[in-house]
Amino acid sequence: MITRRSLLLAGGTGLLVAHPDGHAQRAATVRRVGWVSFGSKSSPAEAYEAFRQGMHDLGWLEGKNVEYQAVYADGDATHLGAMAKELIRQRVDAIVVGNATTTRAMQRATSTIPIVMASVNNPVASGFVASLAKPGGNITGITTQSEVVLGKLIAILHEIAPRARRIAFLLNESNPNEPVFWAAAQSACATLDLTALRIVSNAKPEFGAAVGEIVRQDAQAVVVVADPLYLNERASLQTLMQGIRLPVAYAWREHVVAGGLLSYAADLAVTARHVATYVDKILKGLKPGDLPVEQSNKFELVINLSAAKALGLTIAQPLLLRADEVIQ
């Protein structure tokens, strides 16, 4: 449970506490950290908890020297502007963001409060940082280079369903990385002599029409790219995908836990925990522009055998042995 402390200010000095020995001492400063989620409080909750645990391990004790201000867009990008204003009003010392959509919103809102990225794709091309080695400005953190990983995901899907030649890609045009994802999808499909089909869904009410378009275009398999909208609405999206009975590969493990066939990506919770090291350094005085952006270098293959069985697919033993996690 998030606790809050109020600081009583008088004459520009901090709260003074009287001790038994009669000497007044300044109370410990409580730093404020904002957590911006495109999803809801429970989607995915594991990443937020992992971040807080990482902070705790570094000596940041909630209610004593740090407090968290978590805000949630509940899958609606129109809420992000108001969320940014709220965090600025709260005078947070740093803001943690989880994807390009939330990063863009916070970048537009402030050029002074440090912003720490977790699992943000393509930050240089998106204009978030000047370079990975020397970010400059007020943004740094971790990048996943999802457009590179997307090619590997397509190759694994092809390995599982080699007869599928027409691959539909579910894309969100409001995502700053959509052009990069589509270019990567086309390139990977060309290498494998596959046909890439562009399917757009920018909001939850459009999911049904998008799935209908997948069927209309005679797709034989589907790839759902990394997007916070799809992650937040993974349960409803998975229900629709099951109805068309096609092999579907996803960008994140959480989709597979919800019933999807497979995923290949960095672990969101592990990444969020590591982000705590950036926030720790910033709260201790380092500038975000001087902290190099790290690239995730560990990606996990997750396969759902129940989903494969429902589709009549047999997963080859060598591929199962390569998997980091097999869900029965």
Image (cartoon, rainbow, N blue to C red):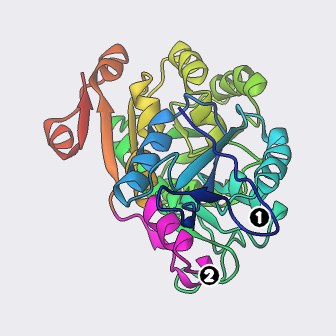
Answer with left or right where residue 92 lies relative to residue 308. right
Which residue was labeled with disc 1? 107
Residue sitting at x 66%, y 76% = 129
Residue 28 shows in the view: yes
Answer with left or right where residue 317 lies relative to residue 222. left
Of residues 159 and 53, the one drawn nearer to the viewer in this rendering: 53
Amino acid type, label 1: Gln
**Is residue 73 placed above or below 86 in the rendered structure?**
above
Instruction: Give the class, few, some or many, for how many residues have Cα within 10 Å of label 2's Cα (few <14, many ≥20).
Output: many
Residue sitting at x 64%, y 75% = 124
Q: Quadrant of residue 303?
A: top left
Answer with left or right where residue 147 lies relative to residue 16. left
Q: Quadrant of the C terminus?
A: top left
Report x, y in % for residue 317: 14, 36
Q: Using the image, tell me which numbered label, if any, was put on residue 289.
A: 2
Of residues 157 and 292, the one drawn nearer to the viewer in this rendering: 292
Please check the rendered image and state whether residue 246 is part of the magenta-colored stretch, yes or no: no
- Report the magenta residues as a range: 276-297
The kind of secondary structure element at disc 2 is helix
Of residues 23 and 195, the one drawn nearer to the viewer in this rendering: 23
